[in-house]
Amino acid sequence: MENAITSVPDFLPALPEILMAVGAMALLMYGVFRKSCDAHETAYGALALFALVAALLVIEPNASIETFGGMFVVDGFTKFMKLLILLAAAAAMVMSLTFIRREGMDRFEFPVLIVLATLGMFMMVSANGLISLYMGLELQSLSLYVIAAFHRDNTRATEAGLKYFVLGALASGMLLYGASLIYGFTGSVQFASIAAVLQSDGTNIGVIFGIVFVLAGLAFKISAVPFHMWTPDVYEGAPTPVTAFFAGAPKVAAMALILRVLFVAFPSMENEWQQIVVFIAIASMLLGAFAAIGQSNIKRLMAYSSISHMGFAMVGLAAGTPEGVRGVLIYLVIYVVMNAGVFCCILAMQRKEGYVEGISELAGLSRNQPMVAFVMAMLMFSLAGVPPLAGFFGKFYVFMAAVQAGLYPLAVIGVLSSVVGAFYYLRIVKIMYFDEPAEAFVQPMPGELTAILGISGFFTLFFFIYPAPLIIGAQAAVGALLP
């Protein structure tokens, strides 16, 4: 009894994760025992659970606390990233409410799987060692494999789930191999211990190979080049709300993990990992910019857009400075909000015969639904980085960090690829406003899509007026990660 009492405080830092796990099990049991349960009932329960977890995170102290033998850490950085993950996951779940009913996916397991995936992302963000890192990664991935193929009557969705599973398994194997190399050459799995060993003993070729394999596994999760091959097919084949989920929350969690691994476990090897990050950033920006030009499916275009945007975020990481990390965090917040708005517009592309995904289907949207066309155009300009919209400031902070770190060629390549990327964003605006009108979409938009689109548009348009809260929050998160 005494041991049980003394061990209780070890669990308190992980209370949000424990609550989410218990809540997921409760929702699953509710769905199983209530015979006529549909996805809407468990979705509302999941959203209430997210709200409760968010409240817990907000009232949590900002002090850095390690528990479970130092494998799990809670600090201001984890709080910032977890709140962003919750925002992205909740937006995707709200977006799915109408879609799953119309597409015959109205099964109670869908929201439960999103909750379990989000729990895995929380574990990734708080991972402070190689074992907890892998546990969180696999918990997230196993749920995402099922979600990608959740529309089981749709051949494309099944194909998307299978591709993601096979390539995800390969990436997990590479990550595990890299982790085993790091453990073999340092004798530890905890990030702080690994850093201490490398600081005292110096770098060796085995650890460098380990970092390469670990970064390869994590780059797969953010769909960075050359580990992006799954992204266009999965984005196109998966149900649209699932694609919206894939484009937001998992990328935030993986980027948070990359930041913690590189800056906490390998700060003494910055010169080595910086070369890898610079290559990934350049390749992602360029491929995302050029490969999207010829796309005719808007979800496929958004896949290449996300590859490009992860490259832009990696520019801040390549700088290796607190300013660079702050730029990455600001960029991720802006990217998640913009992406949510764009996918609301994609979900609104519905006619009597069903949902459509062709970019040409947007023709004449400005005459049929002028407000939707205006917000969509604004989001496209923002994704292209046109001032004074929010997307411009995201790119400004990461490019400024690269310039301050002396990475001038990287910043120049980033600006040039942003100019190339502007072509396909502006092409969508041109189709909406200047092409001959296609058949009008079903009106009006569902209320939940209108709300998310309105919030996304408002944030994107008026961010420049008062950006201070986000900048201060990102600065505090950086201070927790890099004390």
Image: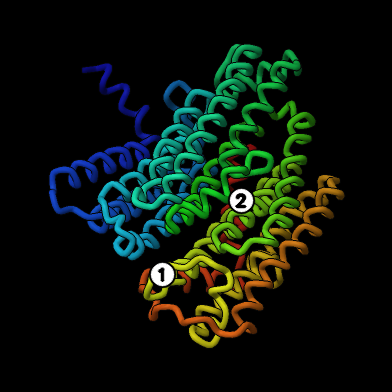
Left or right: 119 in relation to 397:
left
Q: Residues within 10 Å of mark 2 (few under 14, many from 20)?
A: many
Mark nearer the N terminus (1 vs 2): 2
Residue drawn at 64 percent across, 14 percent down: 186
**Foreground tag (1 vs 2):** 1
> Is 192 situated above or below 155?
above
Mark 1 → mark 2, Cα distance in angstroms: 26 Å
Look at mark 2 in the image and give the residue it sits on: 329
The amino acid type, in three-letter code, at marker 2 is: Leu
Residue 227 percent across, percent down from the top left: 64, 39
Residue drawn at 73 percent across, 26 percent down: 268
The amino acid type, in three-letter code, at marker 1 is: Leu
Quarter of the rendering occupied by the C terminus: top right
> Is 464 situated above or below 297?
below
99 or 342: nearer the eye?
99
Residue drawn at 31 percent across, 21 percent down: 6
Q: Label 1's element?
A: helix
Q: Label 2's element?
A: helix
Look at mark 1 in the image and give the residue it sits on: 449
